[in-house]
Image (cartoon, helix red, strand yellow):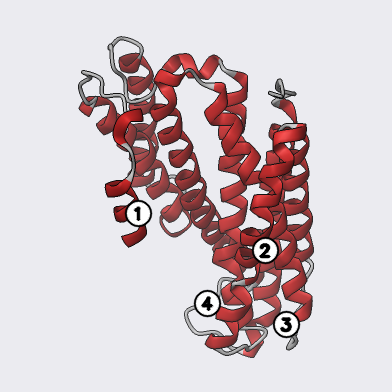
Amino acid sequence: VTAGIVAGILKDGSADAARDETFDRRGAVLLAGCFGPMLFAITHWHKWGYTSPLILFCVCLSLVSAVGLIWFESRICYPIFEPSLLRIRLFILPALATIFLFLSLFSMIFLIPFYLIHPCRFSVNQVGYIMVTPFAFLFVFSPISGMISDRIGSQILCTLGMGIVFAGLFALSRLSPTHTAFPIVWRLALVGIGTAIFISPNNAIVMSAVPPEHMGVASGTLATARNLGMVLGIALAGTLFNMAFHSFSGGLSLKIYGPELEGAFMDAFRYAMFSGAVMAGMGAITAFLRGKEKIKK
């Protein structure tokens, strides 16, 4: 945060272009009404039931807000989201692929600590060290991926990256309880490498595909896609795990873990982790469908 503040103060402001535009407050409210109730419903549908009046109300509110957002945004001068960007193939498909990436990534981030602490019985400190693995590889491989994308474009790298994430998550879904870190670490490393290969070229193509006057909206949309993928990943992973655990354990609760729950826990863990791998596979397909872009020489 401090580095960001210093950079903001010291940067040259000559490149900033101020425009006389109003903030789309109604669009912001509709956007929140679209995503907020949807996430609330996904988080609580297992606990309250699919036909719960509150769940149905949230779903209806989310749908009505989405329709209202589309209708309203197409009729104002300065929308919170520019509808014309949806016609840009190299914008919309990479943004969708971003959602799939972070959905699958945060499914893993949410589930793995419980697996390490309960069936594997690692200490909290050990769990912290192990969970650093994907981010360490992300730090190392991201610059390399960015340099390569300048030469060959984003399609191959992003498809490859999502494919590696799929392989890593699928391998994690095949895990058994273990007391050694290596079988877990190399799988987490795969996910980190795949994420690194994907992110740099994907971000670059999104920003280069939109007109200069819409770069701010495009950047905000990409950030929204990342955060939406994060919260959806956690919500779906928690919901799927709880549903599967409730089914495999005969209706038992995981409030207090015991050795007798290991079998049901691992079955539920594999089910939820494999679902994350499926999301990564869908992301790989989406990344490939973007097609090739012109490489600037």
Residue flagged by tag 3: what amino acid is it? Ala
At horizontal 70% and vertical 47% (from top left) the residue drawn is 145
Query: Mark 4 = which residue?
Result: 254
Front disc: 3 or 2: 2
Numbered disc 4: secondary structure: loop
Q: Considering only order in the chain, which callout, 4 or 2, is on the residue closer to the N terminus?
A: 2
Give the percent coordinates (x, y) of residue 218.
Answer: 45, 29
Say what amino acid the circle numbered 4 marks.
Leu
Amino acid type indicated by mark 1? Gly
What residue is shown at x 65% (from left), y 39% (from top)? 201
Q: Considering only vertical position in the picture, is 3 above or below 83? A: below
Which mark lies nearer to you, 1 or 3?
1
Residue depicted at 45% across the width and 47% down the height: 227
Residue kind at label 2, given as amino acid type: Phe
On the image, which quarter does residue 261 sit in?
bottom right
- Report x, y in % for residue 199: 62, 45
Label 3 to label 2, Cα distance in Å? 16 Å
Can I make out residue 133 in this image?
yes
Q: How far separated are the C-alphas under marks 3 and 4? A: 24 Å
Nearer mark to the viewer, of 3 and 4:
3
User: Tag 3's secondary structure?
Assistant: loop
CA gap, disc 4 to disc 1? 42 Å
Mark 2 or mark 3, which is nearer the start of the sequence?
A: 2
Q: Quadrant of the C terminus?
A: top right
Label 2 sits on residue:
137
